[in-house]
Amino acid sequence: MKQFSYMLHTIFYYAPGESAAYLAAEIMSCLISFLQLILLQSVVDSFLQNSLGSGIWQGVLFLGIYFLFQVLIQNGKERLQFGLEKKVTLALGTHIAETVHSLDYPHFESETMYDLVEKISDKPYEHFWKAFYSFSKVIGILLQLIAVFGYLLYLSGGGVGVSVVLIVLIFYFDYKIMVTSDALENERIPEERRMKYYLNLFYDKKYLYEIKIMQTKNFFMKRIEQHMDKVYKKRLEISLHTQKYYGISCLFLSLWTIWIFAFTGLQVYQGALSAGVFLACVKMIDMVSGLSGDFSEEYVECGEEVQKLGYLKKLEGLQHGE
């Protein structure tokens, strides 16, 4: 949580205007995406009720305005990204250089110091804006989801509770796919690194010559087989876990789809809801499915990037004797 606050404080400190405007644009983009449900419902109902009267042309006009706003917001976000990244890069590059320069001489003989520099030297400023972009996307998705819940409440009243429970379960198991996969991937990395190390020995003339002279080929081949076996077992474990959670997520998505089709279909048949509402619900199912995957991916990515910022924070701690 401290690193998360550190990221937000740094972004808003060095680029306050660009970061605030980008966050607002991301939220606006997500909320405008929700409006396509209302517009789709309006266009279909206008077509069925008025044929080619003024209502349908008004709906088409609003759809055109909707897509225009989407393009303008996307273009604005790209311009804001350029300004934000430029300011953060210049400011943090100077800040990191000053931090390293101010360290006492004993730190330059410390392994801790060089480990930290190794970890943060690969464009550390990128972690700040990548985490901020993912954070902005997550906020936008949550607000868009709240808007979807409001639309469901308007359609089904008390029946919205079933939809809320099923949607939360869909989001949860999509999130578990990303978290489990990421955790198991991190466990696989050391074994894969060792396997690649032994394999590379056979691609280097110097080491290959020594292997032949020392007759250690069988020893290294046995090591490679051992690590390869562990790597592929870990890959199989990742696949099985992710497929399990994916299957559960699809199950709840199917149940929710059946619930929406049954409820809205019955209401349309009874004349309580229009055909436009039914088609809007079809689009809503696709929208929520996409939001669930995007939320899981962006949330996990934000956490990973924020975690990397801890290395820079530790380097600043050396400056203050921590």
Image: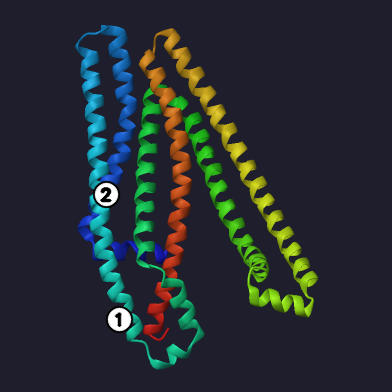
Mark closest to the chain's N terminus, 2 or 1: 2
Q: Is residue 315 left or right of residue 229?
A: left
Q: Nearer the viewer, residue 263 or 101?
A: 101
Pointers 2 and 1 in contact (C-beta within 8 Å):
no
Q: Nearer the viewer, residue 17 or 197?
A: 197
Residue drawn at x 26%, y 69% is 90
Q: Quadrant of the N terminus?
A: bottom left
Image coords of residue 130 (percent x, y): 37, 57
Query: Which residue does the image show at 19% across and 12% down from the upper left?
Result: 54
- According to the image, label 1 marks what residue? 98
Q: Where on the picture, by quarter, is residue 36?
A: top left
Q: Toward the viewer: 21 or 148?
A: 21
In the visual, does 290 lie left or right of 89? right
| Percent position of residue 45, x then y | 31, 13
**What is the quadrant of the C terminus in the image?**
bottom left
Other residues around mark 1 within 10 Å, as few (<14) / some (14–19) / many (≥20): few
Question: Image quadrant of residue 252?
Answer: top right
Look at label 2 and name its amino acid.
Answer: Glu
User: Where in the figure is residue 206, as x and y percent of width and height?
Assistant: 65, 77
Which residue has dot 2 on it? Answer: 78
Label 1: element kind: helix
Amino acid on which the number 1 mark rests in the picture: Glu
Q: Which mark is residue 126?
A: none
